[in-house]
Image (cartoon, coloured by chain):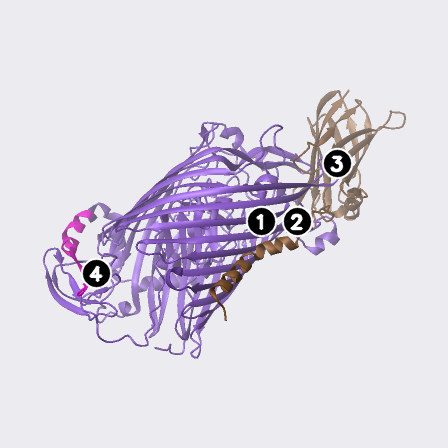
Chain colours: A brown, B purple
Amino acid sequence: MFRFHSRFRLATLLLATPFIFSACKKDKAEPKPDEENEQITTVTYTLTPPPGGGSPVTATWRDTDGPGGNNPTISGLTLAANTTYTGAISLSDETKSPVADITAEVRAESDEHLFVYESTPASLLAITRTDRDVRNLEVGLATRVVTSAAGTGRLKITLRHQPGTKNGTATPGDTDVEVTFEVTVR
Amino acid sequence: MPSLGGLAILFMRVFSYLPGLIAAGLGVALTGLPALPGRAQTAPARCNLVLAGRVADHEAGMALLGATARLLETGEVSTTDSAGNYHFHVCAGTYHLEVSFVGYRSESAELRVTTAVVRNFQLHPDAVQLAGTIVRGQVATAPPTQATAVLGGRALAATRGQSLGEALLNVSGVAAIQTGPNVFKPMIHGLHSNRVALLNNGVRQEGQQWGQDHGPEIDPFVASQMTVVKGAAGVRYGADAIGGAVLVQPAALPDSAGTTGQVHLVGASNNGLGAASATVQGAPRRLPALAWRVQGTVRRAGLTRTPDYWISSSTLAEYNYSAAVGWRAQRWGVEAFMSQYNARLGLYPVPENWNLTARGSSVAPLPASFTYELERPYQQIQHTLFKLSGFYKLNGWGGRVGLTLAQQADNRGEYDKYRPRNDNVANKNLPELDYRNQTTTADLRWEPRLPGNWGGELGLSGTYQDNTYRPGSRFFIPYYTNVAAGAYALGHWRPGPWLLEVGLRLDRRSLDTRRPTRASGAFAVVREDFAFTTPAASAGVVREFGPHVTLRADASLLQRAPAANERASQGVHNGIYEEGYDITRPAGAPALGPETARSAAFSLSWHDHPRLNGELTVYQSQIQNYIYQTPVPPVLDIRGLFPSYRFQQTDARFRGLDLLVAYRVARPLTLGLKAATVVERDLRQDDYLILAPADRLEGWVRYEAPAGKVKEGSSASHRVRGFYAQLGIQSVGRQTRVPRDNEVRDYQPSPPGYWLCGAEIGGTLRLAAHTPVEISVTATNLLNTSYRDYLNRYRYFLDEMGRNLTLRLRVPLAFGAPKT
């Protein structure tokens, strides 16, 4: 048999339910490193001059804290005029431990990827993709870069992810990487 | 288009049922509008004679509230108000008026009406004992002191198949922030998201409601009525209801034995939308105190079509269900309710680097052809609610005590346009953003029975909320624990035609957030604790001037503590970068504190009038430390530049006006007008605020076939009842009230204004003796106009939906003969 007071007590008890929940959960969960979240934090483009032409030149685009927060650090290229360089691009995710090598993944699925190199002005650099995938379409992990007259400009490198739709042009698919470097040729 | 053929046939059929009158009516509406007032002054003028009086107890002389006055000739009924007054508007003639009231002997009188007639009745108590009769009733709750709009009956039926936010657009003063054609976020008087409380069957909807691209996770088919409280209603509905509240209300469980139900079917031509919803409810014959209801909805749509192209990845698939069971005794009752909402909503992929080319040019839409297939990017949402509620009626002044306990789980996955490169990860097909939210709420409400004209209620509420995201998925909203407790008291006094209400509330919210950061290079977790105590107070007046005019005024002071997303959200979803205020707070700037709203509103309504009905609301809200989202210069990511938004804080002022007028020019013909405007000012910058709804004006003409007598020999009118047809025009202006630096702040100028034309016809079709099928066909954007709306987040690259024809059917079900 309930009486008013015991009912009131019951109501109070029920009302306190949310706080009982909170009292039980003292050790609150915390975010863990986002291991499953694929990202590319670093792009390195290395240009090696012909033997005897000096040491390799490297352009780096790095943003380890993701979009927003700290600005990315970008270092440009300084190249010699009238020189033919051999280019190699590498991608990595420095938020993973050990650092994840994205280049290897792109190479393994080279029939789904295409690097696009665009120089502004176009006369500054002549860039040719020198590697091909299983379907004999260009990939762009390896390149040849030819400089002519001295000048300054920009190099935009785009990685297009084209699963099942790769046809040798940049149009299909999505952009995985789009970075721009300052270039000086002297 | 899949269902267009069938639709067209049905459309034709419905037209063939039309009495010739309708065509004439529409013709008049289209061509002869100026001619109408003249007509209005002749015929119906004589039908506006007042027949009124007062019903009182013969012995004590006191007024009888709730007595029924019935005109036998017309079947019209008027119920007496608190002063015992009834009234009718009639044509000249002779009438038989019958007045009845429980416990009194009925009386009738023959009245000859040539001018206004006043006839009072004094009823004699009936000697017959009311043995064995149980009269159940709810004490009528005090009318709200804010302007309130109800979407029910035909108005609600005309929105079946739409999402909740889209349906609410029918209420003047309500707009919606859109994300493509499928996501509608209600905005009341320019305020939205965290500032609008949504109550689903009496439980505050708690999930990921903060996001502007997150529509309410509620199946509108659950509701038999939706109520929009326009204006600050924080004392009753929780401190953050600065903008207002939306109540999604199912019908009460059946209170008599028998099993009934209804089926809704909706089909639309533009996106091949098909929706079906069925409700079955009943009470067992042997245990009529036990009542139950089950309900389920399926909704599916393919790509939406603008006048010129299909919108890529705009499909939707949804299934929802709910069940309720209740036990009701004389003094107490309990009810258990559960519902689940499941939806997959396609989102248009934001074009890459569109913001670079957006200014001055428009990005070509992605090519697409009609499909029902869901493609990335999309949102996958599941919202589950369990609710247990009960009430108990105490003796004497004790009144009524009610308790509601609820548990909600909200899971929202957002799939990026980009599939993971690693095939092992891609094969798991997990969303890139995967929010999880659990909320427990408890509300205790006590309405004591106070003497005289006094009334009121006391309430306590508690919330425990835990928000996480799937480990390994991408951070956007932090892990947080939100514990809130509130207490409120509302009291009212109703001397005569006045109602005065005062309310006080106190809330305490503690928010504990944990978010990851790599700002220093290595992974670390930032823990932050906030606690705010926010008071609220309100005062309101309702004054009735006779049976047709009500004046409302209210003023309130509310405070809202900042939510987790406004402080500490960060990341990219669907090509847009967003961040909270605390992420890159300028050095030395004060932390995000609560916002304080001082609101006042005044509303005048004409109602229950045979000719003129309407409402005018004017309001002002001054919000100190108003928290809002604004575009910032694009953020540079490894994928390029992203359109970016950031939360800011300022002092704001909202001033606006809503108007609704319906004028019956002739007996079957009504003209309507709806208008809304709001001016949002940033007081610190002395500038306009971004993302304010543009001015809206809507006009319509509606024909409703006179009810009652059925003409002999006309088979069509035997079959079709309650026929109506409506033609409307909506005009939305260009939003010119934008910040001075809009050219650099926003990615595109506000789109030009637009005109839309719409039409609706419907009625009740009697297929069999007891199967009245409600049927309607609605056409929106009849002229297939290309337009963009300022409040659509995808307005930078997408047009709105083109012409759309929607067919709606409602079929009532009865299982066996109900017990009488």
Amino acid at dot 3: Gly
Is B459 on the left-hand or right-hand side of B210? Answer: left
Amino acid at dot 2: Glu
Kindly report which numbered mark, 3 or 2, lies closer to the viewer in this rendering: 3
Q: Which residues make up the magenta segment? A: B37-61
Position in image of residue A122 (x %, y %): 69, 28
**Mark closer to the chain start, 4 or 2:** 4
Q: Which residue is label 1 attached to?
A: B483
Q: Which mark is residue B432?
A: 2
Residue pictured at 27% horizontal, 67% vertical? B717
- Give SS at disc 1: strand
Q: Are marks 1 and 4 in contact (CB under 8 Å)?
A: no
- Give SS at disc 4: loop
Kindly report which numbered mark, 4 or 2, lies closer to the viewer in this rendering: 4
Q: Which mark is residue B521?
A: 3
**Mark closer to the chain start, 1 or 3:** 1
Distance (Cα) linking label 1 and label 4:
51 Å
Is A9 on the left-hand or right-hand side of B5? Answer: right
On screen, B413 above or below B360? below
Subunit under mark 1: B
Q: Residues within 10 Å of mark 1 (few under 14, many from 20)?
A: many
Subunit under mark 4: B
**Mark closer to the chain start, 2 or 1:** 2
Position in image of residue B540 (x %, y %): 35, 45
Q: Are marks 3 and 4 in contact (CB under 8 Å)?
A: no
Is B662 on the left-hand or right-hand side of A51? Answer: left
Q: Are marks 4 and 2 in contact (CB under 8 Å)?
A: no
Whether residue B522 can be seen here: yes
Kindly report which numbered mark, 2 or 1, lies closer to the viewer in this rendering: 1
Distance (Cα) linking label 2 and label 1:
28 Å
